Image (cartoon, helix red, strand yellow):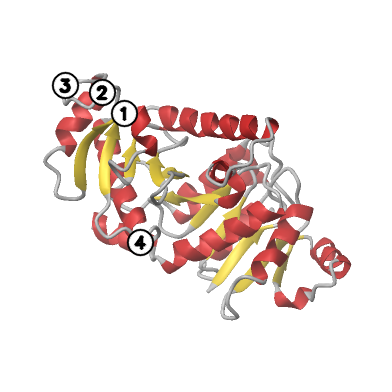
Amino acid sequence: MRIGIDIFGGDFAPESTVLGSILASKSISADIQLVLIGDESIITSICERENFDSSVFEIVHTTELIEMGDYPARAFSVKSNSSIVLGFKLLAGGKIDGFASVGNTGAMMVGATRVIKVVPGIIRPCITASFPRPDQHPMLVLDVGINPDCRPDVLYQYAILGNIYARHVLNIPQPRVGLLNIGSEEEKGNLLTKASFQVMKESRDFNFIGNLEGNDLFSDKADVMVCDGFVGNVMVKQAEAFYAMIRKRNINDAFFEKFNFENYGGTPILGINAPVVIGHGISNDVTVKNLILHTVDVISGNICDNIKEAFT
């Protein structure tokens, strides 16, 4: 297995990305090769400072980067030798099995859709978030930001994608899929959720258990919660603010610590032809380490192949 890592991605790169790669290399098996895409002199310098043998990595040298404030589509076209563009070229050419970055999210989406391309049959790809629960595995929520406006058929496909992800990455044999709404009754909701319920309720593609409410996020009613990207993104940002408030008040609790995004690293883009995992721009070395480890799980779970099979 070969994983490409964008060394220039993120607010604290390349320090955080190189250190995160060093941490990850100590936690993965010997048959996994990390391919670092960035300035070779900087990478080797940080490794020397940390007394780490840089030959453990394969390094693809470039000094060009897409800045966090760059316009994604234009930067992807103009900066053809940037770490993000090179990463997608390597992935499309089969030189790496997955690509991970905490860099410009827009540029990552441009690469995912233009270079790797969407699986035929999928209307729109999406991203997920895992919300911790006290006594169960996390609740998988999707979409959480790519598509703020959705149609019922798009939400139906999200349910399929969430079902596949929960089975093959979270190892849940029969995931229970619910639709986020303002009430549990079938007739509740806005035009989107009412229509989506009608499409989902007779599905044989996943185990649909009906509507979920916001307070079901921490219950054991379902394993996958489907919503549009607008609502999902608001939920993620609220969780981040909740965790920041807990830390500020010096509350030490093992469950609340699970809300720390560092523990999750990143999220795959579901619905494209190869594994691409994106992380938060403010990621530190621990987050980057977990981003890489999660990329290993996504590749090992054959998510892309299982999605292609489901939509063939």
Q: Please report the residue visible at 19 percent of the width from the left and 27 percent of the height from the top.
A: 195
Q: Identity of the amino acid at label 3?
A: Glu
Q: Identity of the amino acid at label 2?
A: Gly
Residue that carries the numbered disc 4 in the rendered image: 171
Residue 79, image x and y in percent?
68, 48
Give the distance between the C-alpha atoms of the residues marked 1 and 4, in whole angstroms: 24 Å
Look at the image and tell me in which quarter the C terminus lies: bottom left
Residue 111, image x and y in percent?
53, 49
Whether pointer 1 and pointer 2 mark residues with C-beta atoms closer than 8 Å, the reply is yes
Residue that carries the numbered disc 1 in the rendered image: 213
Q: Which mark is residue 187?
A: 3
Q: Which mark is residue 183?
A: 2
Q: Identity of the amino acid at label 4?
A: Asn
Q: Quadrant of residue 47?
A: bottom right
- Label 2 packing within 10 angstroms: few (<14), some (14-19), many (20+): few
In depth, the one of 259 and 92 nearer the eye is 259
First along the sequence among labels 1 and 4: 4
Give the distance between the C-alpha atoms of the residues marked 3 and 4, in whole angstroms: 33 Å
Residue 113, image x and y in percent?
46, 47
Q: Please report the residue visible at 27 percent of the width from the left and 52 percent of the height from the top.
A: 175
